[in-house]
Image: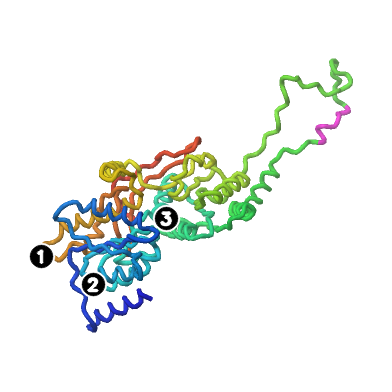
Amino acid sequence: MFAGLALSALTACASGGGHHAPKAGRNVGVLLPLTGANARLGQEMLTATRMAMNTPTAPPLDVHDTAAPGGTAATAAQAAVSAGDGLILGPLTTDETAAAAPVATAAHVPMLAFTSDMSVARPGVWTLGIAPEQQVRRMVLAARQQGRQHFAAFLPENRLGHALGQALQLVCAENGLQSPQIMYHESLQASVTTGLKTLSAYDTRAAAVAQLQPQPDAQAAAPQADAAVDPANPDGAPPAAASDQPAAPAATPDFPAPPFDALLLGDTGLQLGMVINALVETHVDGTHVQIMGPGLWGAFATKLSALQGAWYAAPDPASRQAFVQQFMARYHHMPTPLADLTYDSAALVKALDQNRPAGSANGYSVQALTRPEGFGGVDGAFGFLEDGKTRRDLAVFQILPSGGSRIVIPPAGKLRRSAN
């Protein structure tokens, strides 16, 4: 409701009615939850913002609490626009960004939000969180370089699962790959196993194995009437096997590969355990398939030895070390990953302000924000496209046999031309 009222008021201003918003200047609006349930997180993110704006000539910050009594992200955005802020940093969540974005775009004030949900991005509104689409794009391009052509996804029936599925469809289409097979599953082991059997064509593959199993030869087993008698064994009794040399079992044919050579998963926690069980039962493994997952796996990779060889995409942690050391030296605790985003957003605003054209009110134009080389950040290079998408330079990690992970494809150190 507040977003609608704010948008109506701004539309009236644009058409000549009501009071005109002041011309956007250098000041930077900051929209964060500074009270309420997320106050501690919001305060730390604000601290990182101020840490980046550490010079007397940096643009002034206009801070608004999105959790203030009676307030919302939309009303905070309206306050920033009314104050003449030239750019808005925040808000924090997907829902808050969806509510505040119409206010900012109607006033032609760029917004850099901290959610990772790219569904709320649009021209003039960029999301800084490390998004599923960025992760999927990085892994698909890497898998394609290794010759993978047939992609599939087995994903949870939730927001993350659908974001990953949509990303896989988009990236495959962008790169001329066939449309991926995508299946969503519920959170019961029977449902997970049945779904993966269907996706992997398990019954067809199992039937092929059964046909290749060696069959007993009845004719060969029957005694031959005209066979020569062995003097050492006149009764034709079968020779006794040596006790220290057991008969070798008949070879079992390899289980055929599923109809895909790369599989994207999206589960975490107990549901991921169910998926791992189903992978074993359906013979879907690294022999034929490159398994891929979300960057969230990095937080508990030490427990994922059962997924050895699987990939996830995330920033190289080495790129964060200088920021972490600087933050800890000042504030004596580790910064949260979300503090990386606010630091980067403030640092790029400061850089744009320092390079603003002579005589301009601010340097926050779309052309400046979408410069092809992007920006250097705590979590690696990143940049913006005019349609609202955010590009990131991510590394590809591989799960180790003993758990944990290592980088197998490092970040490029710069942004690629494609939207990754």
Residue type of the residue flagged with mark 3: Pro
Residue type of the residue flagged with mark 1: Gly
The residue carrying pointer 2 sits among few (fewer than 14), some (14 to 19) or many (20 or more) residues within 10 Å by Cα, namely some
- Residue at 22% over, 60% down: 61
Residue carrying label 2:
82
Q: Are marks 2 and 1 in contact (CB under 8 Å)?
A: no
- Residue at 18% over, 59% down: 59
Which of discs 2 and 3 lies nearer the camera? The answer is: 2
| Residue 366 in sight here | no
First in sequence: mark 2 vs mark 3 = 2
Q: Is residue 14 above or below residue 339?
A: below
Residue type of the residue flagged with mark 2: Ser
Secondary structure, mark 1, is loop
Which quarter of the figure has residue 285? top right
Work out whether residue 248 or residue 284 is closer to the camera in this orientation and state it: 284
User: Any magenta on residue 403?
Assistant: no
Mark 3 and mark 1: Cα distance apart in space: 40 Å
Work out whether residue 417 or residue 189 is closer to the camera in this orientation and state it: 189
Q: Are marks 2 and 3 in contact (CB under 8 Å)?
A: no
**From which residue to which does the magenta span run?**
218-225
The reply, left or right, for residue 141 in relation to residue 9 is right
Q: Is residue 405 above or below residue 178?
A: above
Give the numbered dot on residue 132: 3
Work out whether residue 258 or residue 271 is closer to the camera in this orientation and state it: 271
- Residue at 52% over, 39% down: 305
Q: Is residue 264 above or below residue 249?
A: below
Q: Position of residue 336 (x, y in %)?
A: 35, 49
Residue carrying label 1:
359
First in sequence: mark 2 vs mark 1 = 2
